[in-house]
Image: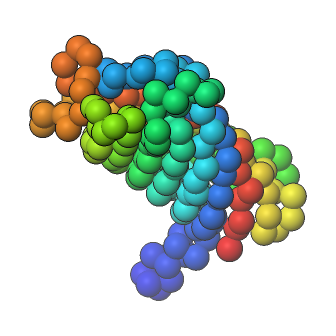
Amino acid sequence: MVGLLLSRPAAAAEKQIRPFVGVTFAGATTFVDFENAAGGPNGVIGAAAVWLGDIVGVEADLGWARSFFQSGDQHQVLHSGVTTATGSIVLTLPRRLTEYTLRPYLVAGAGVMHVSIEHPLGVLPVTDTLPVIDLGAGAVGFVTNRVGVAWDIRRLGSIKDRTAPTGVTIGGAARLSFWRASMAVAFRY
């Protein structure tokens, strides 16, 4: 009887894979940003794996923003990118209340952010990994039993790092924060 009671929530859990595309915006950084691109829109791709109980769940999220510190044809930066990997707690409404509509959720978590910037002639290279927190909200709705769509907006921001940065920064410690808006195809299994 006890085994049945303990296994029931796990069996009722909803597992989802969500590959996404999106855009970052309103970024701020202490890294030298020659092309002033961190604050502008930058494309991002990634995926999230979500395990949802009735109200509480967990999420693993991986995102990659290519050319994050590049803007147009200025060619002051050869290559750049920001990769984020976070684990989050998810809070949502019970599935029975949102079965035929959008299911809103909140996320909060932490992880790492890897920043890389390569300038011409190898001047002022940056390769740094920073601790990061993420806070956001979204909604997911299913068109069929297995396939749906999810929308998400979240703030990703580095937290104070006590190690010395490996690149040139303005204003001390290495910091980077930005908003990310995304849309995903959600696969439920």
Question: Looking at this view, is 6 or 90 the one in front?
Answer: 90
Residue 31: x %, y % from top left: 32, 25
Give the x, y percent position of residue 26.
54, 20
Residue drawn 46% across the image and 42% down it: 79
Q: How many marks?
A: 0
Residue closest to the far front = 121
Q: Residue at x 37, y 28 (%)?
A: 176
Query: Where is 62 relative to 127, above or below?
Result: below
* Quadrant, the C terminus: bottom right
- Counting from the top left corner in percent of width and height, residue 33 is at 41, 22
| x 55%, y 62%: residue | 49
| Residue most extreme to the top | 171
Where in the figure is residue 9, as x and y percent of width and height? 53, 69
For the point 45% across and 32% down, the residue is 77
What kind of colouring is applied to the model shown? rainbow
Can residue 108 be seen here? no
Up the image or down, 32 lies above or below 112; here it is above
Foreground pick, 54 / 50: 50
Q: Can residue 63 be spotted in the picture?
A: yes
Q: For residue 96, what is the image quadrant? A: bottom right
Is residue 76 placed above or below 125 in the rendered structure? Answer: above
Taking the image as shown, residue 103 lies to the left or right of residue 179, namely right
